[in-house]
Amino acid sequence: MKLLVIRVLLLLLAVATFARWAPSQTAPKKVIIDTDPGTDDALAILLALNSPEVQVEAITVVPGNVTAQMGLDNALKLATLANRCDIPVAGGAQHPLAQKLVTAEFWHGKNGLANIELPTRCHADPRFGPDLIIELVHKFPHQITLVPVGPLTNIALAVSKDPSIVPLVKEVILMGGSISGGNVNAAAEANIYNDPDAAQIVFNAGFASLTMVGLDVGNKTLLTDRQIAQLEAAPGPMSHFVAQVGRFLLELSRRFGETGTPMYDPLAMGVTLDPTLVTTQAMRVDVETRGQFTRGETVANRTNTVERNVLRGDRYVIEGMDKVTPNAKVCVDVQAQRFLDLLVSRLHGK
């Protein structure tokens, strides 16, 4: 009898301990979305705003797919669509660090949102995007997840202005780069290509955790007629908008012989919600900033070693191999169907 009582007491103690700690273990991630909306950016934002795993602390806007002003307008439209005018939406950089801006209305429509008109009721936050990032990282040390799904200009500006934020950021999960060729050209992915100097700063800033969700996995997440039909059949203005965007992107992809349209930016947000969606490999990643044909390429060291070359007379001699420290977790595979099911389920009927 005494043994039974002891067991019951131990069980009650375990339940009480779990109840005490469970809320902190399941608390949503605090995220800042840095974005250049953009069609797939729009889907990434809406996915975040309809997912209990994250709490969006701010949306900061960077030029890329569209100009800085159009991107800010679009971010406010998306916040309005989601009825989330409580979230600060702030403009940031107006141009890349060291090159002219390249916009992509061809891929995103003249207004960046697949030529779909949305109303605006939300108002822009007056703070400068990089300053807002700095402020929130200091306000919530070791709690903020940065999710950049555009060029990395704003993140680079924030890091350059206040390097002390780097160890205070919980993690960075970015959409950009590739280890198997680009989409702008043979070497570079668009987000990195649009500001490779900023990307080099970010990759080498020293963040405790940086995950690169690149073209390699994004190209496997093809939104097709099946998912679009599910969204078209669902009630609600949000699912209707997402279906229209999906149809726009799918028809554009089919012009180039594709059977579906990749969900690049939504996948980065998906990885933020559920890291088990992808397989990663630790690599040293640097960004090419000079090459005539390779500017913007993410150069990944898959073995994390380099030859040690020593000059002997008129030639170099390889004396051995030196290890290099990885600075990124590079996504190398994805459970594409599970991700697409997640995307549709979160936006279905909204």
Image (cartoon, rainbow, N blue to C red):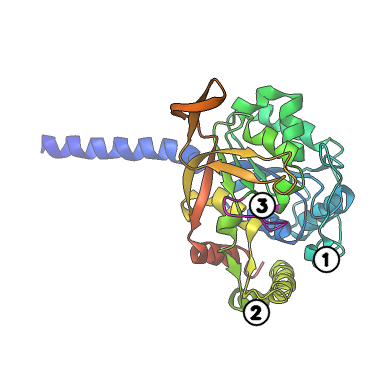
Magenta segment includes 180: yes
Please give the label number shown on residue 187: 3
Task: Check disc 1 and give the amino acid type.
Answer: Gly
Residue sitting nearer the eye, 220 or 313: 313
Please give the label number shown on residue 233: 2
Q: Which residue is mark 1?
A: 109
Label 1 environment density (alpha carbons within 10 Å; few <14, some 14–19, many ≥20): some
User: Residue 211: where, in percent of width, then height?
Assistant: 56, 43
Disc 3 element: loop
Looking at the image, which residue sits at the far top? 313
Q: CA distance from mark 1 to mark 2?
A: 24 Å
The stretch of residues the image draws in magenta is: 178-189
Residue sitting nearer the eye, 99 or 149: 99
Q: Residue at x 57, y 50 (%)?
A: 179
Q: CA distance from mark 3 to mark 1?
A: 25 Å
Label 2 environment density (alpha carbons within 10 Å; few <14, some 14–19, many ≥20): few
Magenta segment includes 28: no
Give the number of callouts: 3
Q: Is residue 150 visible?
A: no
Residue 17 falls in image quadrant: top left
Residue sitting nearer the eye, 89 or 271: 271
Please give the label number shown on residue 219: none
